[in-house]
Image (cartoon, helix red, strand yellow):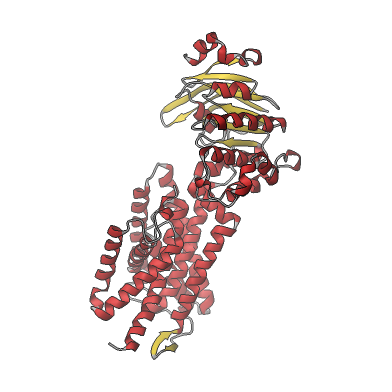
Amino acid sequence: MLSVEKISAGYGAMTVLHDIDLTVGANEGVAVIGPNGAGKSTLVRALCGLNPVRSGRIVKDGIEIHNQAAHRRAAAGMGVVLENRRLFGELTVKTNLELAEHEGARRPKSAERFTFDGVLDLFPFMKGRLDANVELLSGGEQQMVAIGRALLLQPDLLILDEPSTGLAPKVVKSLVEVIGKIRSEGVSVLLIEQNVALATEAVDRAYVMKLGRVVGEIGPSEWKGALNDSGLAKAYLGG
Amino acid sequence: MTTTLFIQSLLAGVTNGCVYGLIGLGLSVIYRGSRVVNAMQGDFSLVAGIIAYLAMERLGAPILIAFLGGMVAGAIVGWIVELLFVRPTRKRGGTEESFLLVTLGGAFAVSAAALLFFGRDSHPVRGLGGNELLDVFDAAIRVHAVWLIVLSLAVVVALRFFYTRTFIGKSIMAASIDADGATTIGINVPLMRSLTFLLGGAVGGVAGVLVSPLITIHYEMGLLLTLKGFTAAIIGTLGNPFGAIVGGLMLGLVEALAIVFVSSGYKDVISMTFLILIMIAIPNGILGHRGRAGG
């Protein structure tokens, strides 16, 4: 599905990411965890093309995509929810979703998993708010619009960057459910999170990043208990 | 003063106001789509006026073709400006101030080029309906001015439709509100910015061909138009194109009344004082802050 091979990236003279390797398989849920400043968001920006990759390769479904323009990566089946959601605040919920739906229509018919109505069924609150400007919604609702927008691109890989930031615990819980439903449709998920509790519930395994490098991998058997494993916490999370 | 004189000045105010509004509309289109305060807006109009004049006087083109040519010329100049000046500045991390300086330099360059190739003289341009006049309660208005008012309003309606109903218009808005978010859903943000300048240039071109028959073309007219259009756009909030036309009409009427009640020599003094007062009293324009706040 996605294979990231030794990529480096940065801003200006500064290199933030060093030789990152990671893979996400079909139907797999993978987390990237690590403290602030680990380079997690830079990794997301490199994956979706907003930051150029300086060396290494990003391969999706056997095709190198790291030299593709950022706006073409949705067509390669990559749906991204950036940190802080990056919605179009002054446009309506409907317009936010429709713009993505239009792009998603360019994907092959076989890739279509979510219709406009399907997204509304996934997030029922939207049905009554379609004509509201997105900026008037709560943080949790905006996060759901952002996820819905990404799903209408008809991705087979969904990348979520810190979706739980600033959300109430109840909303975080519903996020776990939402990610579960998305995965049950056959979409792989790459979840970038500081909230390890959420991540252990939502995905199967994890990479740990620190200071721009992948410093560890936590396999499926260890991952489910990672939260209560003081050894892991010490080794990887600096706790 | 007589009623006729009053009506006459109101008509002049509305006519001029539509011109200021159209220039302001072009400025808003560009600001809203790319966050560039475009000091060349009036020069798009100058170029369009010159092209229309040359097409009619040198090539003998019919007036509608000449006007269309002027509009297309404005659009092309807008597109070139984005490609050659704005885009490289943005790549180097340019701010709103640097865009203003870059386009101000461009405005002087266009003006100088017009002086070089077109000369120092003013050139009269034929208007729609020639020089025919209509009678409105004993006051006279040129048929061309009526067309100018009608076409200005048509441009406003068309732009409103474009931004709220068409996919490209919505994509332009999305790219302007959040460039990264737009990119992730497949919108080609640099292309949207080019289209924004193309559109802003076309609006400037329409303003140019419509105003030229009323004021004659002169190489220095660009910056003057930009300044009036900027005032109109600021009054109506810079990011809100529909505010610009309201702002333009207000400015035009204030000027017209100033001519009647004070003196034509003080026209610009009064309109600029008006701008300063508006900026102090309601810094976000008459339509509130929302137009400009949009990220």
Q: Is residue A208 above or below residue B223?
A: above
B102 vs B265, left or right, is: right
Against A179, residue B267 (above or below) is below
Quadrant of the rendering where the N terminus of chain A is positioned: top right
Please identify the quarter of the rendering in which residue B108 is found. Answer: bottom left
Q: Position of residue A226 (x, y in %)?
A: 58, 14
Residue drawn where x is 52% and y is 55% of the image? B195
Q: How many marks?
A: 0
Query: In the rendered image of this protein, does residue A201 appear above or below residue A91?
Result: above
Q: Position of residue B48 (x, y in %)?
A: 45, 69
Q: Position of residue A213 (x, y in %)?
A: 51, 19
> Residue at image x 61%, y 32%?
A174
Q: Nearer the viewer, residue A118 or B43?
A: A118
The reply to whether residue B67 is visible in this rendering is: yes
Return the residue found at the far right: A110
Residue name at image x 53 percent, y 77 percent = B64
Examine the rendered structure and indicate whether residue B269 appears above or below residue B167: below
Q: Is residue B81 visible?
A: no
Q: Residue furthest front?
A: A170
Extreme residue in the bottom direction: B138
Q: Residue at x 50, y 44 (%)?
A: B179
> As drawn, which residue projects farthest toward the top?
A231
Question: As rendered, which of B180 and A237 lies closer to the eye?
Answer: A237
| Image spot of residue A104 (x, y percent) | 66, 44
Q: Specify whether B45 is left or right of A159.
A: left
Q: Nearer the viewer, residue B113 or A237?
A: A237
Front-most of residues B167 and A172: A172
Picture quadrant of residue B268 = bottom left
